[in-house]
Image: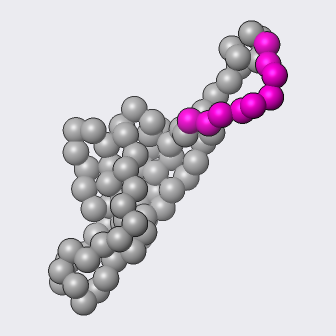
Amino acid sequence: MRRYKIVEVKWGDAFIDTEDFDEADAKKTEPVWRFTVGYLIAKNQHGYVLATDWYEKKEDGVAAKMFIPHGMTDGVKYLR
């Protein structure tokens, strides 16, 4: 039976805002900071692959794949 580590990834997400803005506002714009928790299925040269579900009775049975590129991450914490 395969066990995957559970991680919390802090990452900056892109967004769109349809409100009017000026250059001063644009210069202060930051990503939306998110904290995502999931099973760490793989880490490669591009980023982290997480899954929200893992099926105990199925070898490598994972679902709901989420990919977070390295360039968007600001930290990964391994949880118990």
Q: Camera-side residue: 4 or 67?
A: 67
In the image, is 2 to the left or to the right of 20? left
Residue 41 figure quarter: bottom left
The answer to whether residue 45 is magenta is: no
Q: What is the magenta range?
A: 14-22
Query: x, y (%) of residue 54?
Result: 34, 77
Say if 60 sits above or below 22 in the image.
Answer: below
Quarter of the picture containing the N terminus is bottom left
Q: Camera-side residue: 59 or 17?
A: 17
Query: x, y (%) of residue 60?
Result: 21, 74
Residue at image position (48%, 61%) is 37
Residue at image position (32%, 66%) is 5
Q: Camera-side residue: 19 or 44?
A: 19
Magenta stretch prevailing secondary structure: loop
In the image, is 35 to the left or to the right of 55? right
Query: x, y (%) of residue 70?
Result: 36, 37
Residue at image position (81%, 22%) is 20
Quick check: can you spot residue 6? no
In the image, is 32 to the left or to the right of 59? right
Number of residue marks: 0
Say if 37 sits above or below 21 in the image.
Answer: below
Say if 67 sits above or below 32 in the image.
Answer: below
Quick check: can you spot residue 14? yes
